[in-house]
Image (cartoon, helix red, strand yellow):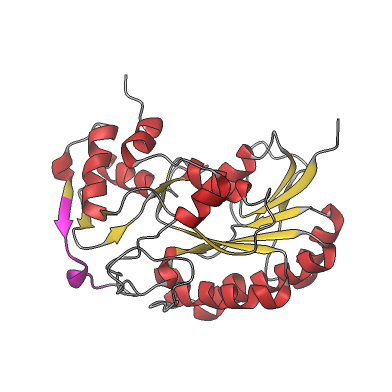
Amino acid sequence: MSEKKKLLVTGISGLLGWNLFHAAQDRFDTYGTHNTIPIPDADDHVLCLDFLDGMELELLVERIAPDVVIHTAAMTRPDTCEREKELAYQVNTEATKRLATVCHRQGARFIHISTDLVFDGQKGEPYEPDDCMNPLGHYADTKRMAEEAIPEAISNYAIVRVALMYGRSMTGDRGSTERVVNTVRDKNSVTLFTDEWRTPILVDDACAIALGLTDVDATGTFHAGGTERITRYAFGLRLATSAGFDPQTIVPGSIHDFQGSPPRIPDVSLDSSKTTTLLGLHLNDIDAGLARLYPGP
């Protein structure tokens, strides 16, 4: 039997990273990195890494010598990125460029996780991978800059723009559905927007796409969105039905009333047909995905 290839997943305390790290175990000799959040039952395949330490990053990759790196680690909260712009740039852009460069030197395939928020939401129909980016917030802009830098650093790469993800995380508060359910359990209502359109994707399907891209030679940008375009409010009502809480705790609102920064974007729905056709995948629709999370009695 041939030896398993080595896979390094960065950011395994996050929603996608945690699920990827476990989904890959059967196929790969899998390593994972984390930073500030400790990993329970960690072994020598789980490594603490500060992405701002360039030398530490390079030495770790050289020591593991992975065949593939899937880079999920990032500062992902848009409001935090607005407050700490330089830190967000260093983590999301500069560290990504450095990691891509090291992967090129090591001969590893580099799969980078980006976001649907690189678009401005004005197209009026689902975005395709070749559509022009126009991010409206600093978080999304750091991801845009990372995307633009990757082809200059490495030739064997895939950029995966992931839509709004839902699923179960290590900490129980990283998925969009988890945050809503946790708020409702604390006896609070949740305001979700009737004019904010997304293509939510079950984290298991996002994992299938990322792992599927380890098996192909395709280079470029790929979308990982779900099969349905839906408003955040309508998604919240579907979640209430599946999770068994009162739909009246989901309060309709409008992005025009949102007072935070950056502004909410009206429609960053993704067309993922290029990805699913290439990989031969059939993704869960929303009802099927929620049923996997909340199977009922």
Q: Is residue 156 above or below residue 135?
A: above
| Residue 145 percent coordinates (x, y) | 56, 78
| Residue 214 percent coordinates (x, y) | 67, 50
| Horizontal side of residue 297 vs 49, given as left or right | left
| Residue 292 percent coordinates (x, y) | 40, 31
Can residue 199 be seen here?
yes
Can residue 187 be seen here?
no
Magenta stretch: includes residue 134: no
143, 208: nearer the viewer? 208
Q: Quadrant of the N terminus?
A: top right
Magenta stretch: includes residue 258: yes
93, 195: nearer the viewer? 195
Q: Quadrant of the C terminus?
A: top left
| Residue 192 percent coordinates (x, y) | 23, 56
Q: Residue at x 69, y 61 (%)?
A: 110
Q: Residue at x 78, y 52 (%)?
A: 67
Q: Residue at x 29, y 74 (%)?
A: 122
Residue at the extreme top of the image, as rendered? 297
Q: Is residue 56 above or below residue 227?
A: below
72, 85: nearer the viewer? 72
